[in-house]
Amino acid sequence: MSGGSGTAVHDPADGAAGVRVPRTLTDELVHAARAGAPLEICGLLVGSGDTVSAHYPLPNASASEVHYSIAPEDQLSAYLRAREEDLEVLGVYHSHPASPARPSATDIAQAYDPEALHVIVSLLGDAEMRAYRIREGTAEEVRLIIEEG
């Protein structure tokens, strides 16, 4: 499936359950990734159930082109904000400015919540966005259902 702003969104299984994301949010993530390059950008994804409704950009504490980390105090503030807004933290997002939209060995090793959604925005060629759940050292791709309007 292709994004309206030139973002390729890979669909691993047509007809399979997935996570719903507004087109405006995918566009915002790609814009943020491009603006933050060559460093990786990161943040939390919030919403309810299987629907991501917003993202909370957070500083990349690693300030790195190949790695991201979120400072505990920033993560706590984001969780408190989600609670105040009656939203669930559904997962994390980060960019890969110079590598594909698939989890690196570091991404997999540092994935502690098996229910968390991991969205990766790659800037190789045309921007590409993919989502995963990482469980017991294995990344399983999750279908992104991009909603228009």
Image (spheres, rainbow, N blue to C red):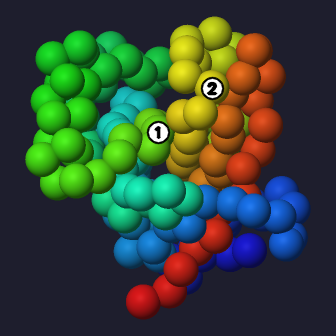
Other residues around mark 1 within 10 Å, as few (<14) / some (14–19) / many (≥20): many
Across and down, in percent, residue 144 comes to 65, 62
Determine if residue 77 is in view. yes
| Residue at the image position 45 percent from the left and 73 percent from the top | 22
Quarter occupied by residue 6: bottom right
Disc 2 on helix, strand or loop? Answer: loop
Residue sitting nearer the eye, 83 or 65: 83
Disc 1 on helix, strand or loop? Answer: strand
Residue carrying label 1 = 91
- Disc nearest the viewer among 1 and 2: 2
Across and down, in percent, residue 138 comes to 79, 22
**Which label sits on residue 114?**
2
| Residue at the image position 68 percent from the left and 27 percent from the top | 134
Q: Is residue 94 left or right of residue 77?
A: right
Determine if residue 37 is in view. no
| Residue at the image position 59 percent from the left and 33 percent from the top | 115
Other residues around mark 2 within 10 Å, as few (<14) / some (14–19) / many (≥20): few
What's the residue type where badge 1 is placed? Gly
Across and down, in percent, residue 61 comes to 26, 17
What's the residue type where badge 2 is placed? Pro
Residue sitting nearer the eye, 85 or 71: 85
**Which label sits on residue 62?**
none
Across and down, in percent, residue 24 comes to 39, 74
Up the image or down, 87 lies above or below 44; here it is below
Up the image or down, 39 lies above or below 62; here it is below
Which is nearer the N-term, disc 1 or disc 2? 1
Placement of the N terminus among the 4 image quadrants: bottom right
Quarter occupied by residue 12: bottom right
Single out the residue that lies furthest toward the bottom.
Answer: 149
Q: CA distance from mark 1 to mark 2?
A: 10 Å
Quarter occupied by residue 149: bottom left
Up the image or down, 89 lies above or below 4; here it is above
